[in-house]
Image: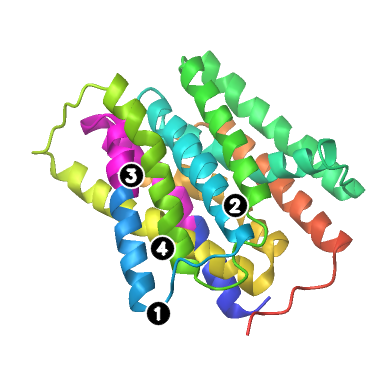
Amino acid sequence: MDIKAIFLGVAFAAMWSSAFTSARVIVEYAPPLTALTARFALSGIVACAIAFAMGQHARLTRQQWRAVLIFGVCQNALYLGMNFMAMRTVEASLASIIASTMPLMVGLAGWLVFGRRLPKLGTLGLIVGFVGVAIIMSARLGAGSDPVGMLLCIAAAVSITVATLAMAGASSGGNLMMIVGLQMWVGALCCVVPAVLFETHSFDLSAPRLWVAFGYTVLVPGVLATLVWFWLVDRIGAVKAATFHFLNPFLGVLIAALLLGEGIRGTDMLGVAIIAAGILAVQLSKQTASPTPKPPAA
């Protein structure tokens, strides 16, 4: 793994983790699904405009269209939709911790659904990681965290697990920025109907924090982080790229503490360290099981 790949991986982890803090700010001033619809629409316009300027087109392969649809529904509409709704009652740090278990869920789903048995290190990592989750969630429930919001976060993590398993091959064939834009529009189409039917459209447009958080969410987690992830997968492969997810629990808690003033509990730090160790063990075991690296794209 070269220096550029390491830089891209750390940058992606930071952008991905920061999205929970900006989302927590947005839902204080705007209804979650309406805000998400606007975010997806704007991110899709920006990404597709950049793609056309780069000479890309929407003539995608069948595999790419499949990934666009599944990624748009599972990651954007379901994963982000449920997280945005949950963060009306759940702290950003807790939402980021639960979401960071996605690599553990991918490993578990690969084992249970597809029969991809993990080496002993990976199995140990799964057990350790979920123990860390149990420590944090039991402590948060005891401290009065909203159980419905926590269930929404768990369901969101399951959704992004499905999206991750389905995105293999999406980065092959080029047109990465166009893929990013199109899957944003899929998310917007999925969110707009429930937003119109079930939400009261009350916004506090006078709050500068809303505009800053919304603009940041559109451009950084919305467009740049997704593109960086595709670049990273294309450069070093999905298995090695997913290793950087072990940084997400730490970064999610740290960013929420610095920008929102959320408290850091001792059980949080213990659980975060255990989860990160479990994620790292699972990903390292996959690299050991599949030592042949993916050649970089031309």
| Residue 109: numbered disc | none
The residue indicated by pointer 3 is 22
Q: Give the residue drawn at x 39%, y 59%.
A: 223
Tag 2: amino acid? Arg
Residue 89 sits above or below residue 290 on the image = above
* Mark 3 → mark 2, Cα distance in angstroms: 29 Å
Circle 2: element type: helix
Q: Give the residue drawn at x 27%, y 27%.
A: 196
Are the residues flagged by discs 4 and 2 in contact, CB closer than 8 Å?
Answer: no
Magenta residues, as a range?
14-40
Circle 4: element type: helix
* Mark 1 → mark 4, Cα distance in angstroms: 18 Å
Are the residues flagged by discs 3 and 1 in contact, CB closer than 8 Å?
Answer: no
Q: Quadrant of the N terminus?
A: bottom right
The residue indicated by pointer 2 is 66
Return the x and y of residue 74 as percentages of the image width and height: 54, 40
Q: In this view, does 263 lie to the left or right of 228?
A: left
| Residue 55: numbered disc | 1
Q: Mark 2 or mark 1: name the one nearer the start of the chain.
A: 1
Q: Mark 3 or mark 1: name the one nearer the start of the chain.
A: 3
Q: Nearer the viewer, residue 4 or 165?
A: 165
Residue 151 sits above or below residue 113 on the image = above
Q: Nearer the viewer, mark 3 or mark 2?
A: 2
Q: Mark 1 or mark 4: name the one nearer the start of the chain.
A: 1
* Mark 4 → mark 2, Cα distance in angstroms: 22 Å
